[in-house]
Image (cartoon, helix red, strand yellow):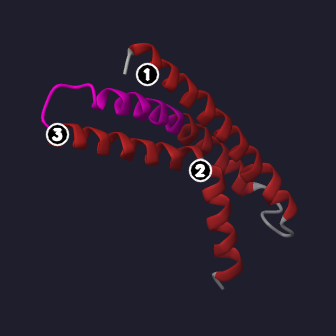
Amino acid sequence: MGRFSSEEGQRRDLVESLTLWVAAEFIGLLFLPSIVEGFDPSGILRRTWFPWSLVYGIGGIVLLTASSRFMATAGDRAGDADSKRIGKLFAQGLGWLGLVGVLYPLIMFVTTFFALKFGK
């Protein structure tokens, strides 16, 4: 795999993860809390979620973009098969961790919603 295709994949992952994060922000912080009756009427939860969603979202975008780069370069490295496999597993782990950061607003809404509805 050449450098151009790796950078193009990294750019594509950056745009896709940024788009996913903006959609998760809108859905998890604005849309769903406004249609669920009685959910956080004062807005305190949403005001505390927003700064953390910025931190986790931007961090998740960086991790997703870096994981795509690691995955592309893991197969090109010199070394034995175990070293390449560990590199690919590390890249996949970074990708999943980045996805959790990007989807933080949705995760917080769903966990809070179920805790309020079924926690009693």
In the rendered image, residue 87 lying in the magenta stretch gets the answer no
> Which residue is at 78% across, 63% downward?
40
The mark lying in front, picked from 1 and 2, is 1
Residue topped by disc 1: 6
- Asked if the magenta segment contains residue 76, the reply would be yes
Q: Earlier in the sequence, mark 1 or mark 2?
A: 1
- How far is disc 3 from disc 1 in space, using C-alphas? 21 Å
x, y (%) of residue 101? 53, 45
Query: Which residue extends farthest bottom?
Result: 120
Seen in the picture, residue 78 relative to 35 is either above or below; the reply is: above
Helix, strand or loop at label 1? It is: helix
**Disc marking residue 104:** 2
Element at label 3: helix
Point out residue 30 in the picture as x, y percentages from the top left corner.
80, 50
Given the image, on which type of amino acid does mark 2 rest? Answer: Tyr
Q: Residue furthest left?
A: 80
Quadrant position of residue 35? bottom right
The answer to whether the residues at label 3 and label 1 have Cβ atoms under 8 Å apart is: no
